[in-house]
């Protein structure tokens, strides 16, 4: 085939120009600025003096930063693996169904994922309302005293984690269903000819063959939950925000409520590095386990 | 073969199916409960017992939300910014995806690495600098200011590249033989062959943009410039403790995306599995 390299490159540059312009403006430039800002004592808007690494040095001794770090880890622990397990259980159930019933049941499980976070907040703030929430009838039934869930520190994170799992499970369910569909039927037929029990079939066939999808779901969820903010911020309204801080919330508070752009940027860089390290580690782990299976 | 086994399987299988269906109904119940509560008069909303259907169905809370808040503006802002994000993201991605997939040019590899790398960067950490940038450009409280920082969706390019990679080269070679320009090839061959992907990606990008919270929340301080996702959380003062009115506003905010999902269920699920790197 005849190619004209110069003309081809010119067309290519024209095609990527809009994308590169937008990326330069809202991705590369702000990322560079973020690192720069983290070494200064600048307010949110305006210049500041160069401080060296002072902003970073102050982070370990900052009680709120520690709360944020700890809460983020706690939140990850409460959502990632439990959420994946719930989604897996649901998708195993859904995959047994067929036709319209399957479409309907899947839609019911998936619908929350499509809703904006503020709608999810309103729904659960109402469902779990201290005085009038319908979930409090369940509390009465079990015999637990009613609690204003989002105003008590001990309840806050587990409750927000629960709502988050409810909200985002639909996404993981879709991935698990795609993974389950990819498992050849013949393997199950062979297993049933061998009279393998349900549990044995799951453990020996489904689980190992589904593992690539499971690790994908865990990776996506882990990275997603490290960046949590919206739900925590919304449910903290009228409660105790300083006990509920997570990383992005801390960054928001420093930058937008206390006008300390430099210190906020240092915390943002730390989160940035955590996410990158986790992503790279995950990627390497997946590659390793992938090559072992081959 | 054990003759008893099919029977045993069916009993357990039926139980699992039943549990799944019951769980699905319970799972979606908070959505139902929110909608039903928004249709009750105030005295019924706060009843001490569970009332699954209103005694007196009323739309007064919807009238309240529509007339006593700026929800009309919020709808307009959400529609405008979500369409803006969708058109710009999908438009720039389809071009870049085509160039990276089909054309050879010197910076191709570094660009592809940049896109893959940006996949890992959490945009939440950029909020400070996005805010500074938009403030300096005078774009706070504007549609452009809401739209611009939301255009980082490398996954759309990645998906386009995968699909363009799979178009058989015969098509391309035939078009080149006919002296077709790259633009013609892109618009007459590659894009039409992948309408399904474009539709799916556009729908989910629209849903993501409609649902975006953190950035629109930071970029806007004027109530009349808020998107609906942010607006409905900023109304505590005007509503007082009227739960039903808050819920009515929430139903109005969630309705368009829920409808988009129910209408295009297959496309939405396709795009979401694609965006996670699985081909459905």
Image (tube, coloured by chain):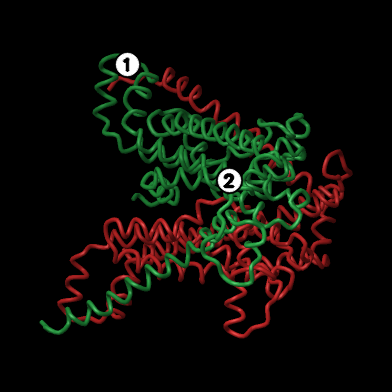
Chain colours: A red, B green
Question: Where does the image place residue B142, in percent across and percent down from the top left?
Answer: 70, 31
Inspect this view and state whether residue A281 appears.
no
Q: Nearer the viewer, residue A72 or B265?
A: B265
Q: Nearer the viewer, residue B140 or A204?
A: B140
> Quarter holding the C terminus of chain A?
bottom left
Select label 1 or label 2 by which is in front.
Answer: 2
Q: Nearer the viewer, residue A63 or B87?
A: B87
- Tell me if label 1 and label 2 are in contact, CB under 8 Å: no
Question: Where does the image place residue B231, in percent across and percent down from the top left?
Answer: 68, 44
Local crowd at mark 2 within 10 Å, few (<14), some, or many (≥20)? many
Write down the chain letter for disc 2: B
Residue at 39% x, 43% y: name it: B264
Secondary structure at badge 1 equals loop
Residue marked by disc 1: B180
Residue marked by disc 2: B252
Write down the chain letter for disc 1: B
Question: Where does the image place residue B232, in percent across and percent down from the top left?
Answer: 67, 48
Residue at 60% x, 53% y: name it: A119
Local crowd at mark 1 within 10 Å, few (<14), some, or many (≥20)? some
Q: Nearer the viewer, residue A231 or A204?
A: A231
Lower position in the chain sequence, tag 1 or tag 2: 1
């Amino acid at each position: 085939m005849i190619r004209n390299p110069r003309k081809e490159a010119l067309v290519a540059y024209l095609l990527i120009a809009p994308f590169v312009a937008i990326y330069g403006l809202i991705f590369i430039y702000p990322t560079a600025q973020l690192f720069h800002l983290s070494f200064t004592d600048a307010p949110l808007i305006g210049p500041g003096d160069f401080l060296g690494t002072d902003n970073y040095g102050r982070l370990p001794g900052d009680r709120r930063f520690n709360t944020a770090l700890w809460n983020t880890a706690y939140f990850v622990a409460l959502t990632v693996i439990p959420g994946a397990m719930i989604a897996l259980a649901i998708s195993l159930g859904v995959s047994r169904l067929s036709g319209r019933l399957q479409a309907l049941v899947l839609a019911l499980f998936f619908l929350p994922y499509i809703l904006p976070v503020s709608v999810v907040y309103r729904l659960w703030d109402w469902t779990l309302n201290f005085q009038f929430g319908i979930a409090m009838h369940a509390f009465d039934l079990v015999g637990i005293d009613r609690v204003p869930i989002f105003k008590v520190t001990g309840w806050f994170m587990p409750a927000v984690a629960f709502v988050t799992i409810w909200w985002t499970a639909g996404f993981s369910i879709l991935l698990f269903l795609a993974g389950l569909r990819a498992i050849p039927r013949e393997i199950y037929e062979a297993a049933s000819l061998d009279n393998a029990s349900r549990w044995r079939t799951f453990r020996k066939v489904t689980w190992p063959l589904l593992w690539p999808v499971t690790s994908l779901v865990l990776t996506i969820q882990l990275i997603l939950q490290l960046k949590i903010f919206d739900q925590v911020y919304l449910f903290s309204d009228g409660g105790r925000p300083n006990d509920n801080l997570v990383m992005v919330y801390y960054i928001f508070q420093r930058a937008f409520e206390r006008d300390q752009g430099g210190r906020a940027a240092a915390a943002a860089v730390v989160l940035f590095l955590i996410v990158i390290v986790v992503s790279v580690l995950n990627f390497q782990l997946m590659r390793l386990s992938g090559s072992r299976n081959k | 073969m054990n003759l008893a086994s099919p029977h045993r399987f069916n009993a357990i299988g039926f139980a699992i199916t039943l549990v799944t269906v019951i769980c699905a109904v319970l799972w979606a119940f908070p959505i139902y409960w929110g909608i039903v509560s928004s249709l009750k008069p105030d005295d019924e909303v706060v009843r001490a017992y569970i009332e699954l259907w209103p005694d007196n169905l009323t739309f007064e809370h919807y009238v309240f939300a529509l007339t006593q808040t700026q929800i009309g503006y919020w709808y307009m802002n959400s529609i405008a910014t979500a369409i803006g994000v969708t058109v710009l993201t999908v438009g720039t991605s389809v071009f870049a995806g085509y160039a990276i997939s089909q054309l050879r040019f010197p910076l191709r590899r570094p660009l592809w690495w940049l896109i893959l790398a940006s996949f890992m960067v959490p945009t939440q950490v950029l909020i400070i600098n996005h805010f500074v940038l938009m403030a300096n450009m005078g774009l706070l409280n504007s549609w452009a200011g809401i739209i611009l920082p939301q255009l980082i969706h490398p996954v759309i390019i990645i998906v386009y590249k995968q699909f363009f990679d799979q178009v058989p080269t015969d098509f391309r070679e035939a078009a080149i033989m006919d002296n077709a320009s790259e633009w013609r090839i892109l618009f007459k061959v590659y894009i039409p062959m992948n309408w399904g992907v474009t539709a799916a990606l556009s729908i989910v990008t629209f849903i993501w943009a409609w649902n975006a919270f953190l950035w629109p929340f930071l970029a806007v301080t004027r109530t009349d410039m808020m998107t609906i996702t942010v607006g409905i959380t900023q109304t505590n003062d005007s509503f007082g403790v009227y739960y039903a009115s808050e819920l009515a506003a929430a139903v109005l905010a969630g309705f368009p995306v829920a409808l988009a999902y129910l209408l295009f269920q297959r496309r939405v699920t396709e795009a979401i599995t694609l965006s996670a790197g699985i081909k459905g």
